[in-house]
Image (cartoon, rainbow, N blue to C red):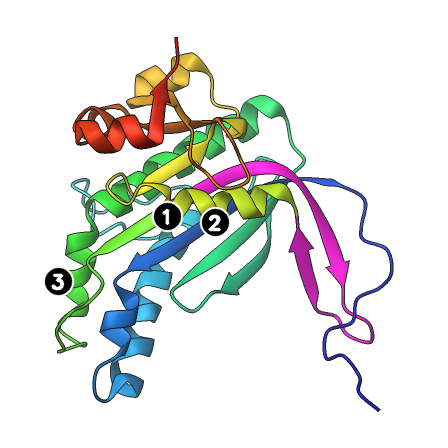
Amino acid sequence: MITSTINFDSTASRPKNGLVLIYDLEGFSKFFNQPDVQDYVPRFINEVSHCISVNIFGGEDYWSHKQNHRPKGLNGEGITLIHEKFLGDGAMYIWTISGEEFNSTDTIRALCNRLWNLKNYFGKVIRKSSDQVPVMDLPERIRFGLARGTIYELKRKNSSQREYIGFCINLASRLQKYCPELGFIASARIGLSEGSLKENGYIKVIAKQIKGFPREIVIVDRNEFERLDTEIKNQLFDELN
């Protein structure tokens, strides 16, 4: 008798307001296909994971130009981390949002800035990692996709394990690889105000080639967007009127 190894309860949870972050290490496959990877890959993954954790929980931000900056992290404001999952060449993080909209918006804005800084200064992470990972072709770039929306919890039968589904999970996955030249793209559904976007150097544009999400309004760094090659910009984006 064949029995499925994945078997969920017949009903998902009630909908929850979720925030989803997915990151990917560009060039990870090339890095992985080297001799003695068992000695090096875990070290590198652990270092990257540590950097993500600093953004979420607080700690020393050694890669930023603000030395010894210790971010507050996402430990309050009604935002609760409920799921972490390693994806082979990156990871996914899911939060639920239950606090005041003003407070959660402030925290999400801070998260965006921290992720952008990590993406922008990722070369310092590579240089630190190279001391313990003495091989060529370390992934030189990290890409982030951030989205917000309804999520549902699936409980595995006869297990405490949980999995999650929701359009924002799919969207975050597509955003992180949509335009590698940018490296950080967030859905406008995360809810930042126009004033907050302007103050922090972001703009809204229309991503018009995301599979399954036609003409999605997204948030990108203004200066990075303006520096994009014109052909790439015209192919992937439309500007908002």
Say which residue label 1 marks: 177
> Residue 28: which disc?
none
What percent of the width, then of the height, locates residue 181? 23, 41
The amino acid beneath tag 2 is Ser
Q: Residues within 10 Å of mark 2 (few under 14, many from 20)?
A: many
Q: For the magenta stretch, what is the residue range?
A: 144-165
Seen from the viewer's position, the closer of residues 161 and 236 is 236
Prevalent SS, magenta region: strand
Image coordinates for residue 85, horizontal then vertical, percent: 53, 63
| Relative vertical location of residue 241 with respect to residue 89 in this rendering, above or below | above
- The answer to which of marks 3 and 2 sits earlier in the sequence is 3
Expressed as whole percent of the image width and height from the top left, the position of residue 106 reads 47, 27
| Residue under label 2 | 173
Q: Mark 3 points at which residue?
A: 127
Q: Residues within 10 Å of mark 1 (few under 14, many from 20)?
A: many
Question: Which numbered disc, 3 or 2, marks the residue closer to the eye?
Answer: 2
Q: Which of marks 3 and 1 is in front?
A: 1
Gap between marks 3 and 2 measured at Cα: 27 Å
- Label 3 vs 1, first from the N-terminus: 3
Q: Which residue is drawn at 26% across and 46% down?
A: 119
Q: Which residue is drawn at 45% across and 38% down?
A: 210
Going by the image, does 77 lie left or right of 6? Answer: left
Amino acid at circle 1:
Lys
Q: Is residue 136 left or right of residue 42?
A: left
In this rendering, is residue 105 above or below 213?
A: above
Q: Can residue 75 be seen in this view?
A: no
Say which quadrant the N terminus sits in: bottom right
* Residue, far right: 10
The secondary element bearing badge 3 is classed as: helix
Q: Are marks 2 and 1 in contact (CB under 8 Å)?
A: yes
Q: Is residue 202 left or right of residue 5?
A: left
Q: Name the secondary structure under disc 1.
A: helix
